[in-house]
Amino acid sequence: MSQPTGAELPQGMPTIRVVAMPTDTNPAGDVFGGWIVSQMDLAAGTTAAFRANGRCATVAINSLVFLEPVVVGDEVSIYTRIIRTGRTSLTIHVQTWRRARHTHITSKVTEGEFIFVALDEQHRPRPLPPLQAGEDLPAPDSTTD
Ligand SMILES: CC(C)(COP(=O)(O)OP(=O)(O)OC[C@H]1O[C@@H](n2cnc3c(N)ncnc32)[C@H](O)[C@@H]1OP(=O)(O)O)[C@@H](O)C(=O)NCCC(=O)NCCS
């Protein structure tokens, strides 16, 4: 993938890449914010389920900002990073970047924090398992409970 044009680089693990399609637009013809949030939730949920080694549910979206619009044809890339873990919960920092079709120009379009809870078979909170050998630790600038 081409490098972003600005000084900033994507933070986190590349988790989902998808092309925005005409069916993802709102009545005004722009890509629907809810579609982007669902992609962010899906990406964060994938990272949460991997770390929790099982089922997780979104319990909160702590923050979410839309920085730039996404248009049909954009390549949309979602990056996730676990920034905090508790007894049963994980906080995941999520960024969305766009690359305009036929260009090398990329830019950050959204950023947010999603909180997930690991669940057991009865949908009750479940303690997170210990990190496995070789599993990535949270980034050095993150915090853990
Ligand atoms: C997830 C759910 C089982 C948690 O139940 P709960 O009674 O709040 O559970 P607890 O109070 O034991 O909290 C569990 C963890 O979630 C955290 N938590 C709960 N609500 C939170 C909130 N609003 N914001 C941040 N963290 C929250 C708690 O701090 C705790 O974290 P810890 O164990 O790491 O300390 C319940 O809220 C639920 O089923 N929500 C609906 C989930 C859903 O349908 N999501 C959308 C589809 S995936």
Image (cartoon, grey):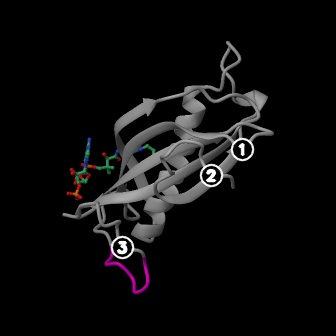
Q: Is mark 1 within 8 Å of ligand 1?
A: no
Identify residue type, mark 1: His
Please indicate, yes or no, whether residue 142 appears anywhere in the rendered image: yes
The magenta segment is 129-135
The crowd level at tag 3 (other Cα within 10 Å; few <14, some 14-19, many 20+) is: few
Dominant secondary structure (helix, strand or loop) of the stretch shown in magenta: loop
- Determine the residue located farthest toward the right in the rendered image: 102
| Labelled pair 1, 2 in contact (Cβ < 8 Å) | yes
Residue 95 spot, x, y in % from top left:
48, 45
Q: Position of residue 60 (x, y in %)?
A: 34, 41
Q: Kindly identify the residue that appears in the image at 44 percent across and 71 percent down.
A: 53
Secondary structure found at label 1? loop
Q: Amino acid at mark 2?
A: Gln
For residue 139, what is the image quadrant? bottom left
- Residue that numbered label 3 is attached to: 137
**Which tag, 3 or 2, sits closer to the chain's start?**
2
- Residue placed most toward the observer, 33 or 101: 101
Quadrant of the image for the N terminus? bottom right
Q: For mark 1, what is the residue?
A: 104
Judge whether 31 appears above or below 142 on screen. above
* Residue 118 seen in the figure: no
Q: CA distance from mark 3 to mark 2?
A: 25 Å
Please check the rendered image and state whether residue 132 is part of the magenta-colored stretch, yes or no.
yes
With respect to residue 105, does 13 lie above or below? below
- What is the secondary structure assignment of the residue under circle 3? loop
Q: Amino acid at mark 3?
A: Leu
Residue 70 pos. (x, y %): 63, 30
- Mark positioned earlier in the residue sequence (1 or 2): 2
